Image (cartoon, grey):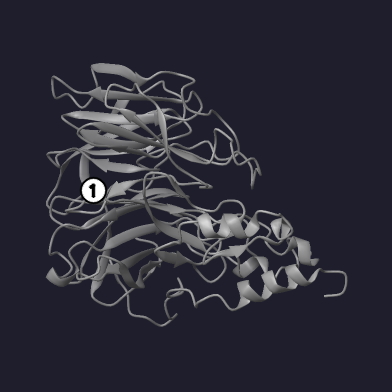
Amino acid sequence: MSGISDRMKITFLLALFAPTLPALAQLPPDVKSDLGPDVPAFRVRPGYRVTRVIPNKALKVARFIQFSEDGQTLFVSDLENGVIYALRDPDENGMYKTITNFVKNKRSVQGMDVRDGWLYFSQASEGSVSRARDTNNDGMADDIEEVVPKGTLPQGGGHPYVGLLVTDTQIFATSSDPTNMTEDLNSEWKRIYVFDRDGKNKRTFGTGVRNVEKLRHRPGTQEIWGFDHGSDNFGRTYGEQIGSNQPITDLNPPEEFNKFVEGGFYGHPFIMGNGVPRPEFAKRRDIIELANKTKQPDWLVGAHWSVLGFTFITSDQFGADHNGDVFFASHGSWNSMKPVGACVQRIMFDQVTGKPCGSMTIVDCVGPDRRLARPVDCAEAPDGTIIFSSDEPPALFRISKSK
């Protein structure tokens, strides 16, 4: 490590000896998997079953998913084509028979939430939030209105996504870092914003996030949770050959599952994971101050897993002791030499402390030489089963108890 400062060496050692990460994504190659008809050769944890929700190639794109409040409609956002699909009328096998364009001709629809009969949705390319409803039950929205006007939220960038959480009185919206890591502490990006329900009274709720694409309340509480992506090329400063020899970057930094609190600072881009500074910022005069200020993650996920969406579970479908656990969808990123992530995992919550206490892979979507699917989001169906989406290829699958 000649030529590297003592502080950078210490940073490297801190990263190496950070607490061990939770369970790896990959399940054993010989695991016996319970798969329904026309499901790719996923590896599935014993006790769980994966089936299709829609026929192969039924949707052009499948990104984020959201059930209506009555559970009768499953909304699916299509970021590329500006469409939100409405899926209804599942048959006896849980396959949706009716698919309509609930919202169309929009730009970059992504984040969604429901409240009081409205579907709220974000358009990051315009920096806006709108809401829509279907008043005549034909599967298409006939009442659409803008709530947060265009240009109110930061627009575009390399991570053009806005995650939403709508409560009885407020709208929370995330804003990502437009690049791998912009250094400006006072940037309008890298924030979680909050508005009144009418879209007015914009203020900052939290700062120091990189790319949080979904927010949700933990059931029975007002706690706000979300996953934040780690930044790329952690080992470049140490002389790695990015894309060909990157043993440091492949394992760092971990991604974070955070409980977001008002006024909280979450470290990006200066502090990663369990209080480890990125080497690029090790010589900053305020690095200790920033470390002291950073809210520590409640759970860590592997580097470059790219967790996009998740859902808390509220039923006893998978065991009464685990009501309140999380199912999350890991998409996998480009910044790893081997395909990583591409799975659906379950995080268990301690019923006494209200904190994550373990995790396990439910569905492993990595094949021998490629990803068989790239999960995006999870949603709990009315019967307690879990739906997860994939955008490569576009598909929807259901996780239930094995027969």
Identity of the residue drawn at 25% across and 54% down: 218
Q: Where does the image place residue 328, in percent across and percent down from the top left?
A: 36, 58
**Residue extending furthest toward the right:** 3
Instruction: Name the image quarter holding residue 249.
Output: bottom right
Residue 146 visible in this rendered orientation of the protein: yes
**Quarter in which the N terminus is drawn:** bottom right
Q: Mark 1 is on which residue type?
A: Gln
Eyeballing the image, is 144 above or below 226? above
Residue 240 visible in this rendered orientation of the protein: no
Eyeballing the image, is 133 above or below 296? above
Identity of the residue drawn at 51% across and 27% down: 125
Which of the pair 133/279 is nearer the observer? 279
Q: Neighbour class for label 1 at 10 Å: few (<14), some, many (≥20)?
A: few
Residue 54 located left or right of residue 241: left
Which of the pair 195/333 is nearer the observer? 195
Eyeballing the image, is 373 above or below 63? below
Q: Where does the image place residue 19, in percent across and percent down from the top left?
A: 50, 77
Which of the pair 95/86 is nearer the observer? 86
Which of the pair 71/246 is nearer the observer? 246
Counting the numbered discs, the total is 1
Q: Where does the image place residue 101, in percent across and percent down from the top left?
A: 30, 27
Instruction: Name the image quarter holding residue 199.
Output: top left
Q: Give the residue pinned by disc 1.
A: 222
Identity of the residue drawn at 24% across and 22% down: 141
Eyeballing the image, is 258 above or below 41? above
* Label 1: which secondary element: loop
